[in-house]
């Protein structure tokens, strides 16, 4: 037969009845062989009798094949799962034959005509089942091997190491074996735990990571390492990736199974991302009180299209809420959230384009939807932009928060949770100062209302809009360099899901007046982050991608803080969550100043063309610890600002 014709026939999926027919032919042939082996030793091999008894055998196996649907499998994709199903099918057929034979022997006497057809040898049933199982699996494997040999032999195999010899590593191994197109050849399993070294798994050696050096890589021509561990401790990942990156190996990772449970996704092997190397163990919250606290309630999320707001919306949407309102002024971004979010109660999920600075509009929202819980995530957050636009920073971060807090009190909202930032601590820029001022106003409301006002404060969020990681990725796409403001600059990092878990946890445990902060571990040096990203993308520093120091931006700190100098913390039920004891000195005076500032920006004097120096001067009067850094507003530091009543 012409090879091209054979290839066309192999590529074509045959009708399922053809596969069933072939399987039945294999069953019959195996029965002939088994009958010959069993009965020839006994000296009573009878071809006519064999053919009569084969009818019962074929009927039982036909029923088993139809019940288990083994004929529906694509033969060239045969793997462990298909082989397991064939084993179960043969076992079912054998049990049917054993059971039927037991009953028929008791009902039909030996020597009768019926006994010639229906009485079967137990040893024959077992021998036939064993042969049939082996031949069915072998036939499928042989077909797959021929298919791969004809279509994929020209492709060079990629030599792979799998880090992790436990269950996830075995799953990764099975995934690679099933992916015939990728032509992966696993060389060995790698471990950093000495108790597994020297053993074998799936016929492959388990090697200690210290034994993987340049000589080993050259000897086995290793191209790639797949990290497959259930405990994805970033500190451990960082050590492992550092070792393999020095050997210029491509790195991939398989997600832990438990990380997929909430999203309903399936395991896949993907590129290692910088988020996987956060540098500390991820903070995990699993408090059933969170779900109970929000069950059946009306919930309002402002800033629902932002990085934090959208993830917060997704986490809340999966809970048994009564009614939920997602509000943002960014129409396109809110539309994206609407199209991707999965809600537990779609009829009571509302997406509204609106502005928290519009008091009349927001009052209508409160009157119509009557929220029980408000998560206030709407804010401007970019430090350099807000340093150049203090009016907009105050107008949104302070005035908008004031409107939301006042309406919450007016409508007796059960809980109000505001999302703040570590930049509010000893602020050196306008953005941080506006968030601190908003914190002050929110805290002052606790004494004036039955509403529980709660604040969450955390550091930079990995992968959020405008954050350092997306910026570095864009710069690498353009060929570099990566721009860094200072060689020693450090930041605290957390993932978006972690940040949103904190917000929900705070909403559940908060009683009012608290500022919740995370123990975020060690701060991350941005220079180290940049170097890791360059290596993960497969570039060499500085030959291919360089790093350029451009100097601190206006208002930017070298080191961020989570607590001010005069703040202490109180422990909570979770070891990673604390409550900041914030000074409430002069809170009445500060509230009066805040109201005056809000009225000023809302008046004709507070237009977009208003005097930026006057706005920031008033802001410094409210937040005396606000000391500008590398900014034109440094000239205002130390000035006395009189109280101006609203």
Image (spheres, helix red, strand yellow):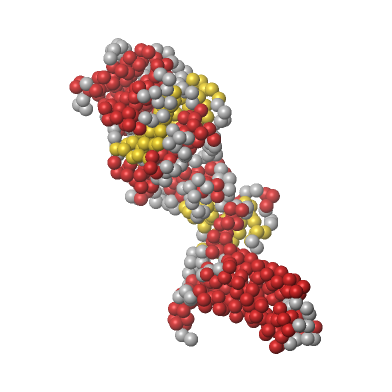
Query: Is 217 drawn above or below residue 459 in the view shown?
Result: below
447 or 28, nearer to the observer: 28
Direction right: furthest residue: 42
Residue at (42% x, 22% y) in the render: 451
392 or 358, nearer to the observer: 358
Q: Is residue 353 left or right of residue 486?
A: left
Q: Is residue 118 left or right of residue 470?
A: right
The quadrant of the image that shows the C terminus is top left
Locate residue 33: give its quadrant.
Answer: bottom right
Residue at (27% x, 30% y) in the render: 361
Residue 574, percent from left and from top: 56, 30
Residue 120, percent from left and from top: 73, 77
Query: How many numbered discs?
Result: 0
Query: Is 52 drawn above or below residue 551 in the view shown?
Result: below
Residue at (43% x, 20% y) in the render: 450
Residue 432, percent from left and from top: 37, 27
Locate residue 57: give its quadrant.
Answer: bottom right
Residue at (28% x, 19% y) in the render: 597
Residue 207, percent from left and from top: 64, 55
Taking the image as drawn, is residue 242 in sight? no
Locate residue 35: give its quadrant.
Answer: bottom right
283 or 635, nearer to the observer: 283
Taking the image as drawn, is residue 368 in sight? yes
Query: Is 546 drawn above or below residue 510 in the view shown?
Result: below
Q: Is residue 238 left or right of residue 357?
A: right
């Amino acid at each position: 037969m012409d090879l091209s014709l054979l290839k066309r026939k192999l590529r074509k999926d045959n009708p399922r009845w053809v596969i069933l027919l072939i399987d039945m032919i294999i069953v019959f042939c195996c029965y002939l062989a088994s009958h010959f082996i069993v009965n020839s030793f006994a000296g009573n091999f009878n071809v006519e009798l064999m053919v009569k008894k084969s009818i019962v055998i074929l009927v039982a196996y036909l029923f088993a094949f139809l019940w288990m649907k083994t004929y529906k499998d694509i033969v060239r994709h045969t793997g462990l799962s298909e082989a397991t199903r064939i084993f179960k099918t043969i076992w079912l057929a054998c049990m049917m034959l054993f059971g039927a034979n037991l009953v028929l022997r008791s009902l039909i006497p030996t020597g009768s005509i019926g006994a010639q057809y229906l009485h079967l040898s137990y040893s024959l049933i077992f021998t036939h089942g064993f042969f049939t199982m082996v031949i069915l699996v072998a036939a499928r494997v042989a077909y797959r091997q021929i298919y791969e040999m004809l279509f994929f032999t020209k492709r060079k195999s990629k030599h792979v190491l799998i880090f992790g010899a436990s269950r996830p590593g075995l799953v990764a191994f099975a995934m690679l074996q099933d992916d015939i197109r990728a032509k992966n050849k696993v060389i060995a399993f790698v471990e950093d735990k000495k108790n597994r070294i020297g053993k074998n798994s799936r016929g492959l050696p388990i090697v200690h990571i210290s034994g993987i050096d340049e000589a080993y890589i050259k000897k086995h021509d290793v191209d790639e390492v797949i990290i497959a561990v259930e405990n994805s401790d970033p500190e451990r990942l960082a050590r492992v990736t550092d070792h393999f990156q020095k050997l210029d190996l491509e790195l991939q990772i398989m997600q832990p199974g438990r990380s997929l449970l909430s999203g309903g996704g399936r395991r896949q092997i993907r590129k290692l991302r910088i988020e996987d190397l956060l540098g500390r163990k991820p903070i995990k919250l699993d408090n059933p009180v969170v779900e109970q606290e929000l069950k059946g309630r009306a919930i309002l999320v402002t800033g629902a299209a932002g990085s934090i707001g959208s993830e917060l919306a997704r986490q809340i949407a999966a809970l048994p809420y009564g009614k939920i309102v997602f509000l943002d002024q960014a129409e396109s971004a809110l539309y994206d959230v609407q199209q991707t979010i999965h809600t537990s109660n779609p009829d009571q999920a509302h997406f509204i384009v609106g502005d928290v600075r519009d008091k009349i509009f927001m009052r209508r929202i409160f009157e119509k939807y009557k929220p029980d819980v408000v998560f206030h995530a709407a804010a401007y957050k970019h430090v350099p932009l807000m340093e150049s636009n203090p009016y907009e920073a105050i107008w949104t971060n302070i005035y908008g928060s004031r409107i939301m807090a006042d309406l919450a009190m007016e409508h007796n909202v059960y809980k109000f949770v505001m999302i703040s930032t570590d930049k509010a601590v000893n602020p050196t820029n306008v953005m941080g100062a506006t968030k601190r001022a908003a914190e002050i106003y929110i805290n002052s409301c606790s004494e004036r209302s039955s509403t529980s006002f709660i604040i969450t404060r955390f550091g930079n969020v990995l992968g959020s809009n405008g954050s350092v990681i997306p910026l570095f990725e864009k710069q690498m796409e353009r060929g570099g360099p990566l721009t860094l403001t200072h060689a020693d600059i450090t930041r605290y990092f957390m993932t978006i899901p972690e940040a949103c878990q904190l917000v929900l946890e705070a909403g559940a445990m908060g009683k009012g007046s608290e500022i919740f902060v995370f123990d975020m571990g060690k701060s991350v040096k941005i220079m180290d982050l940049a170097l890791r990203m360059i290596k993960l993308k497969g570039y060499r520093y500085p030959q291919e991608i360089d790093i350029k120091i451009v100097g601190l931006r206006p208002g930017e700190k070298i080191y961020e803080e989570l607590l001010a100098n005069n703040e202490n913390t109180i422990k909570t039920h979770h070891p990673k969550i604390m409550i900041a004891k914030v000074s409430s000195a002069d809170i009445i005076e500060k509230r009066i100043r805040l109201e005056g500032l809000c009225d000023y920006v809302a008046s004709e004097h507070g237009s977009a063309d208003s005097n930026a120096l006057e706005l920031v001067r008033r802001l410094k009067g409210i937040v005396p610890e606000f000391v500008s850094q590398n900014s034109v507003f440094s000239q205002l530091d130390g000035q006395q600002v009189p109280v101006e009543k609203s």
